[in-house]
Each structure stands twice: as C-alpha cells, then as structure tokens.
Image (cartoon, coloured by chain):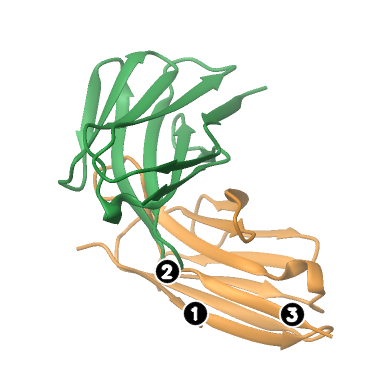
Amino acid sequence: ELKVEQNPLFLSMQEGKNYTIYCNYSTTSDRLYWYRQDPGKSLESLFVLLSNGAVKQEGRLMASLDTKARLSTLHITAAVHDLSATYFCAVDSNSGYALNFGKGTSLLVTP
Amino acid sequence: SQTIHQWPATLVQPVGSPLSLECTVEGTSNPNLYWYRQAAGRGLQLLFYSVGIGQISSEVPQNLSASRPQDRQFILSSKKLLLSDSGFYLCAWERDRIGYTFGSGTRLTVV
C-alpha cells in the first residue's frame, strides 16, 4: 500500500520564524507535488518536483525532493500570516494515474 | 489557457435523493479526469478517474458512480445519497502528469 506521511500535521509558528514541513512516501515515484488549501477552498498547486535533487522556490516557500530517501521538504522562510493554510504533498499512485495525498499540514502563523 | 469548471458550488440534499455533479475542462483535449472527496477536516480520497470517453476506473466501492459522456466532461452521480456522502468534492484534470489542476469544488451536505 502506497503511503504518504506528512509531519507535523499541525504547526503554529510566529511571524518571522523559519520552519520545515516533511513529506515521506513509500513509492519509487520520481515526482512529487505540493498544494496549498485555504479554508473552504480548493487546492492550489505550489510546486511540481520532477526529479531527484529538484529544488523550487516561490517567495517564502522552497521545496526540495530526495527520491533516494523518498523525502520532500517544504521550507518556510520568515513566515507571514498570509501563509496560514493547509499544505498537502502528493505522489503519483501506483497505477500511474491520480495522486495519493498526505493528510496535510495545517499551518497557523501568528503575530 | 486551460480552465476547469465545477458546479454547483454548494448543495444541500436530503438523504435518499439523487445527485449529479458536473465538471468540464476547457482549452485542452484528451485530459485525464478525476473525482476526489474530502471529508471535513480530513485528507483527499480518490473516487474515480477516467482516461477517455466512457472509460471509468473506480477506486472506492460506494453508492457513487461516474460517467464521461464527452471528452472534457466528467459527471459524478448517485441514485440515493447517504449521510456519509457529505463532503467537499473536487474534480481535477491532467495530461502527461505534468501537473494536476483542481476545480473550485462542490460542498455537499446531506441532511
């Protein structure tokens, strides 16, 4: 059974601080996806990591992928309140179609 | 550019009533289409996916069904809703696994 595990599941952090969300997966997939979900809203694509060693950055968020360790990280730099949301990582399913998602990390950035 | 539309945005239905949710994609051809469900405060569960007209793969046995009558149209149905069918339903599309794009979602409450 393909597993995608995120930690932490809940994260409260102060504005200006740095933190990392971890995503471990059990498949041999060479690509990984990060999404953001605001309360009551749909999923917004943040990053698609397509190969081992891939690193992508957008604003205060940076994602990386280590396919050998089956690990992806989402690093938050100098957090601001607008980053408060739930972040999901996902990998391709064993069938090659659809994504298997982690349970999500609920991030709350406080003043 | 490609766009994905879902409707309705919200729906309140009594137990035992039928359901029809529609999803359409514009600006692409031969997309792979997906239905996911997100229960309150939980992760995303793949319900169905389709790689072509009339081709439906079911991931979870339940009282829901899906159909793809046209290349860019994906419909989720039920003959008789259960309380447990409540949730946030998301349609998504992709081609060549470059990235999965989600619709705005339908929030279904079964009462």
* Rendered location of residue B24, percent (x, y): 49, 22
Question: Does dot 2 land on a helix, a strand or a loop?
Answer: loop
Instruction: Look at the numbered discs 2 and 1 and tell me whether their residues touch, using CB distance below 8 Å.
Output: yes
Do marks 3 and 2 both belong to one polypeptide chain? Answer: yes
Instruction: Look at the numbered discs 1 and 3 and tell me whether their residues touch, using CB distance below 8 Å.
Output: no
On the picture, is B105 further left or further right than A95? right
- The CA span between labels 1 and 3 is 14 Å
* Rendered location of residue B74, percent (x, y): 38, 24
Marked residue chain, label 2: A
Q: Residue at label 2?
A: A103
Q: Residue at label 1?
A: A9
* Tag of residue A109: 3
- The CA span between labels 3 and 2 is 19 Å
Mark 1 / mark 3, whichever is N-terminal: 1
Chain ID, green in image = B
Residue at x 24%, y 43% (from the top left corner)? A95
